[in-house]
Image (cartoon, rainbow, N blue to C red):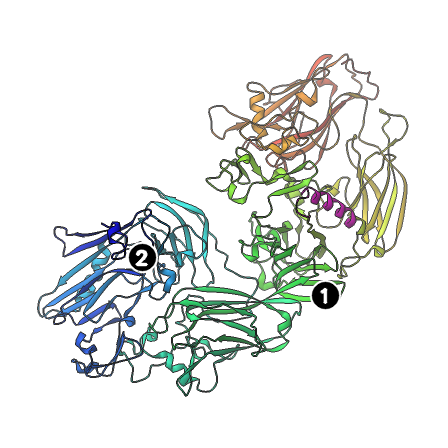
Amino acid sequence: MWDPSLEGKFVPLNIDKRFILLRGSSGFYSYGIYEHLKDWPDFDIGETRITFKLRKDKFQYMAIADNRQRYMPLPDDRLPGRCQSLAYPEAALLVNPKLRELAGEVDDKYQYSCENKDNQVHGWICTNPPIGFWQITPSDEFRSGGPHKQNLTSHVGPTTLAMFLSAHYAGQDLVPKFRGGEPWKKVFGPVFIYLNSAPIGDDPFWLWEDAKIQLTYLWYINEDCISGRGAFVGLAPPGEAGSWQRECKDYQFWTRADEDGYFTIKNVCTGDYNLYAWVPGFVGDYRYDIPITINPGSCIETGNLVYEPARDGPTLWEIGIPDRSAAEFYVPDPDPKHINKLFVNHPDRFRQYGLWDRYTQLYPNDDLVYTVGVSDYTKDWFFAQIPRKKDDNTLEGTTWKINFKLNNVVRNGTYKLRVAVASATLAEIQVRFNDPKTRRPLFTTGLIGRDNSVARHGIHGLYWLYNIDVPGAQLVEGDNTLFLTQPRNTSPFQGIMYDYIRGRMQVMMDNGIVQITLSNPDGIVTGIRYNGIDNLLEVRNEESNRGYWDMVWNSPTTGITTGIFDVIKGTSLIVIVENEEQVEISFTRTWDSSMQGKFAPLNIDKRFILLRGSSGFYTYAIYEHSKEWPGFNLGETRVAFKLRKDKFHYMAVADKRQRSMPLPDDRLPPRGQALAYPEAVLLLNPIEPELKGEVDDKYQYSCENKDIKVFLSAHYTGDDLVPKYDEGEQWKKVFGPVFIYVNSLFDGNDRLQLWEDAKIQLMIEEQSWPYSFPASEDYPKSEQRGYVSGRLLVKDRYINSDYISANGAYVGLAPPGEVGSWQRECKDYQFWSRADENGYFSIDYVREGDYNLYAWVPGFIGDYRYDIVLTITSGSYVEMGDLVYEPPRNGPTLWEIGIPDRSAAEFYVPEPNPNFVNKLYVNHPDKFRQYGLWERYAELYPDNDLVYSVGESDYTKDWFFAQVTRKKEGTKASYQGTTWQIQFKLDEVDKSTNYTLRIALASATFSELQVRVNDPKVGNAPLFTSGLIGRDNSIARHGIHGLYWLYNVSVPTTRLVQGDNTIFLTQPRSTSPFQGIMYDYIRLEGPPSSPSPTS
């Protein structure tokens, strides 16, 4: 026990050493409990271990692995007269050992080091009598530095060690430092000291095999760990990605994934951890961002985790294998005078003494030169970049060269050099390109590392990864040279072991206001620098997950209906325009038959434009399907930007739709609870407390096309708006340009001014459309487009005997088709305008082509189409004159429900469940965007369905906005269809002709509309059925409309009676709470001679 009287004499720790002997056990256990109490003095622990020094007259054969065992020198062989000291005390040349066959060998305890993952059993064998003494460590949980940290094992003495904590092969980074009265407690061990024996005359070396068997009997051992190139996956204290490597105070638990990536980490101590991993073959570190809390008996299934290693684009060239080791590089034969025979023709030949001296012998005059495409890193890349020994025995730094060719260089682009280091010892890396004499390097690591792996025969130590931006201005077309200088030279053991080096290129566009960085040739926006912020995009995301074009597609021949998600990556870069006024660059991906099934059969040309003086950039893309290519379906395509979550918290999509938003972390357990579908999350414990109890769902922030610009999606429409391209169908379309605008304010100004400024910028962009600067021939300029104008009138004699101006009509040009076909047309261009109060319209800047003119008029049902196909040519101007739309009408209106505006917004939208509120939509015109409104129907109509009485009911209060299914009481996820009633009176029934029921639907989702008149029995055949219609999913996605449907139902006079009548509207489909219908408008018309209704 420590107390203040011991200060300066003993480490300020309470230490409890324990030993355990079990009945029937051929050995004993030992462990220690170290505890530093709060407010005790500061201290560092450089090393702690258990040591056993065995009888040198008995134990002379040492074993630490199947291929690392041998007869060892005696302790006396390391004394003067029998040995010669070498470059450091641990290394000795055996000159006159007692065992003569060892003469001329080098002995060095560091030659027998092991990685933690392999350091589980080692020890000594006495051959006469056959006795084994073994240190068995079945768990690494108390060791630091992860599974690849190296430590000492056994060595001359004969000595055997159980290393718990050390700075070997790591330096000060793995020395725990306790400061400021930090409390700490840790158990080291238990380890098992195993003793075994064999009868005299039996093979004594079988004792090693028995010791390995004993290891598998002990607790903690994870039999799921397999050899091979599986990921190393572990739990360690919470920290940054890769922090486990330098964490040295607490427990770590590691395993290795199998060939399919599955892993199990067993017997984890209770506590809070992050899950970390690194994957051989890939650079960088993975961290699962959500802390994991282990409780007694807990079993946590993380599901599929995805690691996206650092990558900006395809590899231009690479050297080595990213495995955190330099073992794949050239390791020379040792000086014949300094050999350890164990490591001759051995996989661990790097453990020979004095290999650092071999560099100068192999490169006596000039340093290493590696030529990409010619050299072989297994033969031509020395395993360590170390100082050169000069003729006067002094040392000098070294500069290695990598020669490579570039066919094209973007001068204003940026290349990326990734340098992964397997070990560093008081070293520095300086990087230069094409000029070795520049005083100031492009990049320097500064002084790094204390691993001492060169001297201690390691092939790795701590891992370092550097991502270096290389300006294109420093490169040339043709031959280039990368210079890697290690200038530190006070010791022969200073130096760098490289793990892996990779060259790639990115492009940077900069106009002095905004700087855009794109991967090359992928064309992924990896960075946006603006107003002093290095990157507006989420820097914690992988670079391929920041700003990108993507699509969802599938092949119609596979029968698979789910889409394939593809972040669109180019394969080549072309600079289209580069002058003082603008830069336009193109990233293309060209399809061929080898890509079938992997990528959509499209040629894709993504373009990015930066203009002088512009606070933002433009992007557009050209998609082309050749007639020789297979068919496919295009479910969605878009541009996405993921912004920094530490910077952007306030979102605005409209004047009345803006707010502070939850953070991404708030949507993850335990901060968020998933609701009926993954996009909807209840915020239980958000980082911003004022958001607690709210619902977040991306669909709550959807907009109509007229209010926001999108490219293509099936949201709120379903499969009807998924373009389906047949084999042999030629197609080409330009999406965009869109403008990515960035703005800023002086400190202290109202941040909402940024929104007002963005709206002003929108007006500027609209006035500039079509843009004059895009260079693609597929994007016509204003003078290459045509114009259409005219006036639209409405003729409905039951409303007005005169023509009615189509006030606010939506008038558009779309490909030729049937009346209303524009709604489902999704392959080509459409151009829309809105008529003024007198019905006049003008459609400007129309692309060349054949069109029909379509329209629909708020306040009137149905669709208008001008039957003559219009051909628009470059510069043409088409004056349509007066056009007349006659909406469907057979007779006078007897009664009506709603407003014919293709929306259900006028109907009753209930208040949300108080447990599922989004505060933005409280007392908001878009209250339909609240979550869970579909469940309110059964609460408002607990026993019977909706009944609407014409002349008494008010559709704004008494007509629910959606006819949804009813959830059955006492059951889980069981629903039933619903039947709504419309009750009305007729003073008399005109028997001369049929009545007409007009039903306009604003949306339908896997539903059916059945109409019955004065016949409530659902089992009877309906007067009318729509059949199964719609995939809008507007109910779940908080929409108030989707695709428009208009049904004209002829009602025989025999179905009607004088007096009270009832129309029954049944929606029978009921497998989901989201099935249903949103009505737009319902009208009953009498015969042309029908008298006016009395009610």
| Structural distance between the alpha carbons of marks 2 and 1 | 57 Å
Q: Amino acid at mark 2?
A: Arg
**Residue 74 visible in the snapshot:** no
* Residue 764 inside the magenta-drawn segment: yes
Please count the marks in the image. 2
**Can you name the residue that lies furthest to the front here?**
5
Disc assigned to residue 143: 2
Q: Amino acid at mark 1?
A: Ile
Mark 1, Cα crowd under 10 Å, few <14 / some 14-19 / many 20+, is some
Residue at point 35% right, 66% down? 169
Quarter holding residue 451: bottom left
* Residue 98 inside the magenta-drawn segment: no
Image check: 547 left or right of 797?
A: left
Is 609 situated above or below 705? below
Under circle 2, the secondary element is loop
Image check: 146 left or right of 983?
A: left
Q: Position of residue 503 (x, y in %)?
A: 54, 69
Q: Position of residue 852 (x, y in %)?
A: 81, 45
Under circle 1, the secondary element is strand
- The answer to whether the residues at label 2 and label 1 have Cβ atoms under 8 Å apart is no
Dot in front, 2 or 1:
2
Q: Name the N-terminal-most of marks 2 and 1.
A: 2
Magenta region: 745-765
Quarter holding residue 880: top right
What predominant SS class does the magenta segment belong to? helix
Residue indicated by mark 1: 576
Q: Nearer the viewer, residue 913 or 434?
A: 434
**Can you name the residue that lies furthest to the left here?**
200
Quarter holding the C terminus?
Answer: top right
**Residue 671 visible in the snapshot:** yes
Residue at point 76% right, 63% down? 581
